[in-house]
Amino acid sequence: MPEQLTKHPDVTLQVLRSGGAKCGVGEAQEILTRCPAERFCKLPGGEVCVYGLPDAPRMTQITAADWQALAAATVPASAASVAAPVSAASAPQPPPAAWPLGAASGAALLLVGVAIGRLWRRRR
């Protein structure tokens, strides 16, 4: 029978109860004998133990090797480079011609806006 790990164990227990599970009411624990009674659910098809993140170390079906594999799979390979200080020389820089082009485009749009405004005012 499974142990379930969730960020929201109370919501999970509520959902299980709404589906007919008997949770935290003192049902006999035949397989998940080490599950805390308040996190134990019994269903017609079996048993479930719901753990929250703080209770994860108490889980019995996940080994230290499983946790290490999970940690390795969730840490990006570039994590070390993120922690390293970024120097000005290594930081990405915009191409040298980018700002004049942006300034020229902005000026052109401003002039077009002024021209449209004058035409609109004359037609009124």
Image (spheres, rainbow, N blue to C red):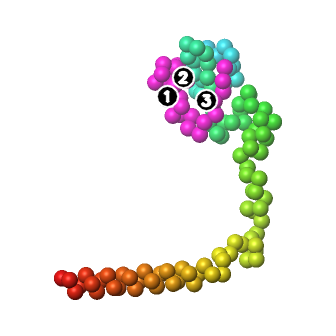
Residue 50 disc label:
3
Instruction: Please provide percent x and percent y for residue 45.
Output: 58, 14
Among the 4 quarters of the image, the one containing residue 84: bottom right
- Residue at 69% in and 36% down: 56
Q: Which residues are magenta?
A: 1-24
The residue wearing badge 2 is 23
Q: Residues within 10 Å of mark 1 (few under 14, many from 20)?
A: few
Q: Give whichever of 78, 41 is nearer the camera.
A: 78
Q: Position of residue 85 (x, y in %)?
A: 76, 69
Q: Quadrant of the C terminus?
A: bottom left
Q: Which residue is mark 1?
A: 15
Whole-percent x and y of residue 91?
72, 72
N-terminal of the pair, mark 1 or mark 2, is 1
Residue at mark 3 to residue at mark 2: CA–CA distance:
10 Å
For this rendering, which residue is in front, 102 or 65?
Answer: 102
Q: Is residue 87 left or right of residue 35?
A: right
